[in-house]
Amino acid sequence: MQHNAGRIGLLEDDPIMGESLVQRLSLEGHKVQWWTRGEQALRELSAHVGDFDLVICDIRLPDMNGEDVFRQSCCESSTPFLFMSGYGDIDQAVRLMRSGAVDFITKPFEMATLLDRIASSLRSSPRDSLEGELGISASMRHVEMVLRRYAAHTLPVLIQGETGTGKEICARFLHQVSGRASSPFMAVNCAAIPGELLESELFGHERGAFTGANQLHRGYAERAGDGILFLDEIGDMPIPLQTKLLRLIEDGHFHRLGSEKPIPFKARIVCATHQNVESEPGRFRQDLYFRLSALPVAILPLRERPEDILWLAQRFLDEITEARDTPVRGISALAEDVMLEHQWPGNARELRNRLERAAALSENTLLMPIDLFPDKRAGHVAGSVATLSEARDAAERRQILRVLSMTNGQISEAARYLGVSRTTLWEKMTRFGIEGGARSEN
């Protein structure tokens, strides 16, 4: 497998491992700078800011901790760090990833595994632009980058965000980009299944385990195989079942109801919730929360990332028109303006539902404001602007968002369409509270 070459800083005090890594990485085409002490690495990183594509860093060093090197270097550079950790350092490595480290690998490791992690880290470094498969806003590009980084690990993932923000879509994306893509993705909505049935649905039951159990039932945990078990709305799981889920994570096996035979659990757990379960000790076990949130993901509501509104709308509409017979082929500029003014309390789910209804009922080729917002009158749809200056600003903001959607968040291309310099566009985006999209363009 061919990997992209990069300039790599290696911080490893063990002479045998250090020399071995330098030789192998050099054979792969990477340029490697090897340091044996943290102070030496900090001096080099400070003197050559931006010159390194990746730093591979051991956590335990003779003069200082690898975490100290990472935190001090972050003050001057955004160079991604990949940590090598012993088994006893895993908790610290997880903490470092939550602080911004790009990845970690546990010793001892296969060289092929390290090379794959390096390739993934180089692809996800800030200087590379992401495809924008989940959105074109900076926040969703970051979510995508984080999910790609998490894909190679086995630790649980906790996705948090308001209802309708796309938590399950993110979980399925994680499944898609991971090595488990060919294995099952089993989704369980903990809020939709009554508490007394949830345990049976999750772990399964033997024939005769309880009244009505007429045959063997394999639960979601078993059917997930070595794929992903997605527990949606985990905050609604009853406390007794939370205890059994914690035991599943700690022991790596479970029992069907009515059986004492342990069944090995091989799947990866991914959870989602719209609740702040960390602040609800009476409703959610704190020890379970800490286990599930080893690798966290936070999704902003749609109103806080308006760049994604038109981008999502076009993707949704393409899917809708492909699946049904409708004269609708696009969205009018007037409807786009109204969509950009709307606060979307239901987030992406509300956006899709409005488009589904509009496409089903409209007889127009282009959707109009009334098609999407039949509950609003013209005066309420347009909003009220007090001055010409405010009207001009509102129009500029809508046009910038429209062009960013059209260019998939590429700032330079958007600036060309708008007839302004990239610097001018950045200034206007900052003034209008619009996130930067693909910041890493050349």
Image (spheres, rainbow, N blue to C red):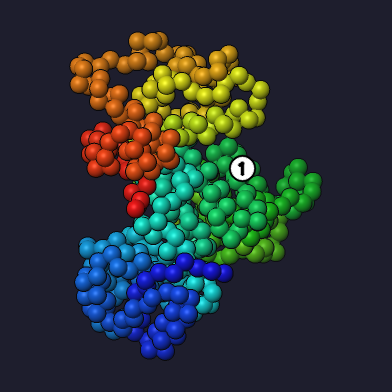
* Above or below: residue 79 compared with residue 165: below
Name the one closer to the observer, 61 or 156. Answer: 61
Task: Give residue 433's quadrant in the image.
Answer: top left
- Residue on which disc 1 sits: 196
Residue at the location (42% across, 13% down)?
376
Task: Give residue 100's quadrant in the image.
Answer: bottom left
Mark 1 crowd level (few <14, some 14–19, many ≥20, 10 Å Cα): few
Q: Where residue 439 appears, x then y in whole percent?
A: 33, 49
For this view, does 378 lie left or right of residue 72?
Answer: right
Q: Where residue 328 appears, x then y in whole percent?
A: 57, 21
Q: Where residue 411 appears, x then y in whole percent?
A: 34, 42
Name the one closer to the observer, 280 or 403. Answer: 403
* Above or below: residue 373 compared with residue 431: above
Question: Is residue 347 visible in this depiction of the protein?
Answer: no
| Type of the residue with mark 1 | Glu
Q: Secondary structure at mark 1?
A: helix
Residue at the location (55% across, 15% down)?
364
Residue at the location (39% across, 84% down)?
18
* Above or below: residue 284 compared with residue 251: above
Q: Residue furthest right?
A: 214
Q: Where residue 118 appears, x then y in whole percent?
A: 45, 68
